[in-house]
């Protein structure tokens, strides 16, 4: 039972508000590794013919539905339009020299030109220098042809080929994190596109590590509930992109997803770990959509080692 308990708690965590059960929310970060530990423990207990193997086998069986959030082998096919979600870490503008920032932007060009998205939802995108921002705009507006832009705060952008109509956004209480949304025609029908960036784990700071983790988990839970209410009130089908800073076995993921489809679960192929930082095995960046749409392919793009997130790319089409 002792081996199975952490895995069973991970399975329970998405259904409990993280404000009241934040230790469980913290546990879900290690879900893939807890699963593997249970798998090894199960094999060892079976070899020893120990009756405790039943608990580990039960936990493993119950966790199987979650694995389509991390590993999949779906067929890929072209869609009617392509959406890209990208956290760009400000092109390292806060930690390297200006010449290096310029080079980082240049290094993104072949990746963007190869993918040719019809919509880009960008987080942490703008830098603090107008010359670099102009360099970004020239790339997105010029070769990519995404001339329609919604900018919400310095960090959040939605780019589109089609004219962006009504739009709105919200800065979450007591934070710099936010989300924005825009309505426009995509594939001949109107859609509302959400771009969000939820609270991080805040692993650096003056407060103790446990306090920072607790505060980040609680803040994300509240932010997820705000986003979910806005998504539910949309008069149009929804495409939702962003950096959740949380994993698929979390309350945050379940709350934001609601009735939306997870692109990787529907059309992913291979592994989908999107965080490139020091903690391995984290999938924290997503593209979701309403049931009126369907995913035809979904993959991650490693656009450079200077980013701490992989980009997420999805092809979609309207259901007939």
Image (tube, rainbow, N blue to C red):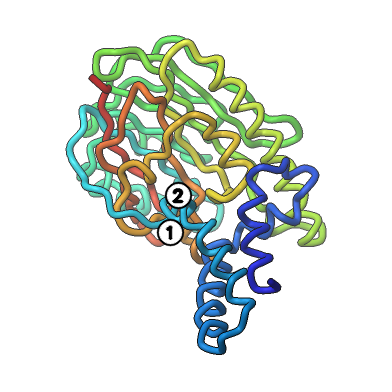
Image: 78 above or below 108: above
In-image side of 68 versus 37 (left or right): left
Image marks 1 and 2: residues in contact by CB distance under 8 Å? yes
**Total tally of numbered discs in the picture:** 2
Q: Residue 165 location, x and y as percent?
A: 41, 10
In this rendered view, identify the residue nearer to me: 8 or 100. Answer: 8
Q: Residue 296 location, x and y as percent?
A: 25, 37
Q: Identify the residue shown where x is 44% and y is 50%.
A: 69
Q: Residue 1: which quarter of the image?
A: bottom right
Image: 308 above or below 280: above
Residue at numbered disc 1:
306
In this rendered view, identify the residue nearer to me: 4 or 295. Answer: 4
Q: Identify the residue shown where x is 38% and y is 25%.
A: 291
The answer to whether one can see residue 308 in this image is: no
Residue at numbered disc 2:
91
In-image side of 175 versus 160 (left or right): right
Image: 270 above or below 133: below
Viewport quadrant of the C terminus: top left
In-image side of 78 versus 47 (left or right): left
């Amino acid at each position: 039972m002792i081996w199975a308990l952490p895995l069973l708690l991970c399975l329970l965590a998405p259904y409990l508000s993280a404000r009241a059960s934040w230790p469980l929310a913290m546990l879900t970060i290690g879900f893939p590794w807890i699963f593997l530990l249970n798998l090894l423990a199960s094999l060892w207990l079976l070899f020893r013919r120990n009756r405790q193997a039943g608990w580990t086998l039960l936990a493993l069986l119950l966790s199987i539905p979650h694995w389509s959030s991390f590993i999949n082998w779906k067929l890929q096919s072209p869609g009617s339009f392509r959406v890209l979600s990208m956290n760009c870490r400000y092109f390292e503008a806060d930690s390297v020299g200006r010449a290096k920032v310029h080079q980082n932007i240049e290094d993104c060009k072949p990746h963007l030109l190869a993918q040719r998205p019809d919509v880009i939802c960008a987080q942490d995108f703008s830098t603090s220098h107008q010359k670099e921002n102009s360099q970004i705009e020239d790339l997105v507006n010029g070769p990519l042809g995404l001339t329609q832009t919604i900018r919400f705060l310095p960090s959040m952008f939605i780019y589109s080929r089609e004219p962006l109509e009504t739009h709105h956004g919200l800065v979450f209480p007591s934070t710099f994190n936010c989300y924005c949304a825009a309505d426009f025609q995509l594939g001949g029908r109107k859609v509302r596109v959400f771009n969000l960036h939820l609270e991080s784990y805040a692993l650096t700071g003056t407060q103790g590590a446990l306090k920072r983790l607790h505060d980040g988990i609680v803040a994300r839970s509240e932010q997820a509930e705000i986003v979910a209410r806005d998504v539910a009130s949309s008069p149009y089908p929804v495409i939702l992109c962003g950096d959740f800073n949380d994993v698929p076995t979390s309350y945050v993921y379940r709350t934001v997803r609601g009735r939306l489809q997870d692109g990787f679960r529907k059309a992913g192929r291979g592994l989908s770990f999107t965080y490139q930082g020091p903690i391995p095995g984290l999938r924290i960046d997503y593209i979701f959509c309403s049931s009126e749409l369907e995913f035809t392919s979904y993959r991650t793009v490693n656009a450079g080692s200077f980013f701490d997130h992989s980009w997420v790319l999805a092809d979609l089409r309207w259901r007939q």
